Amino acid sequence: MILEGSFGALPIEIKIGSTIKSRHLQPLKNFIAQNDLSLGILINNSNEVQLIADGILQLPATLV
């Protein structure tokens, strides 16, 4: 999903698992790079807010 506003574009990916393999982040990484964005968000069932890759912030689904 892409959230757009006065801040620009923010790509958001939602996964059901609590952990994610690096290879599953590649589409989000590619979108961020191709659109010259500084941040993407991954929402999943993790327990902590964490920067899981360069420019990708993980947010637990229970926070949103």
Image: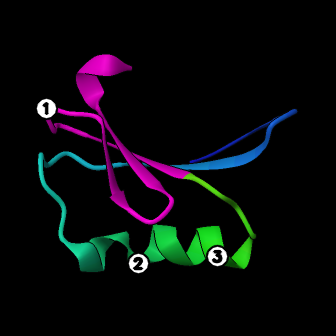
Name the secondary structure under disc 1: loop
Mark 1: amino acid? Asn
Q: Distance between the residues labelled 2 and 3?
A: 10 Å
Query: Any magenta on residue 36?
Result: no
Q: Going by the image, does 3 lie left or right of 11?
A: right
**Mark 2: which amino acid?**
Gln
Q: Mark 2 or mark 3: which comes first in sequence?
A: 2
* Residue 5 image position (x, y, % from top left): 82, 34
Marks 3 and 1, how far apart at CA: 27 Å
Q: Is mark 2 on a helix, strand or loop?
A: helix
Q: Residue 26 carries which label?
A: 2
Q: Residue at x 13, y 32 (%)?
A: 47
The picture places residue 53, in percent across and down from the top left corner, at 37, 64
Q: Mark 3 points at which residue?
A: 33
The x, y position of residue 14, in whole percent, is 36, 46
The image shows a total of numbered marks equal to 3
CA separation, marks 2 and 1?
Answer: 22 Å
> What range is drawn magenta here?
40-64
Q: Which residue is drawn at 27% across and 80% down?
A: 23
Residue to which mark 1 is pinned: 47
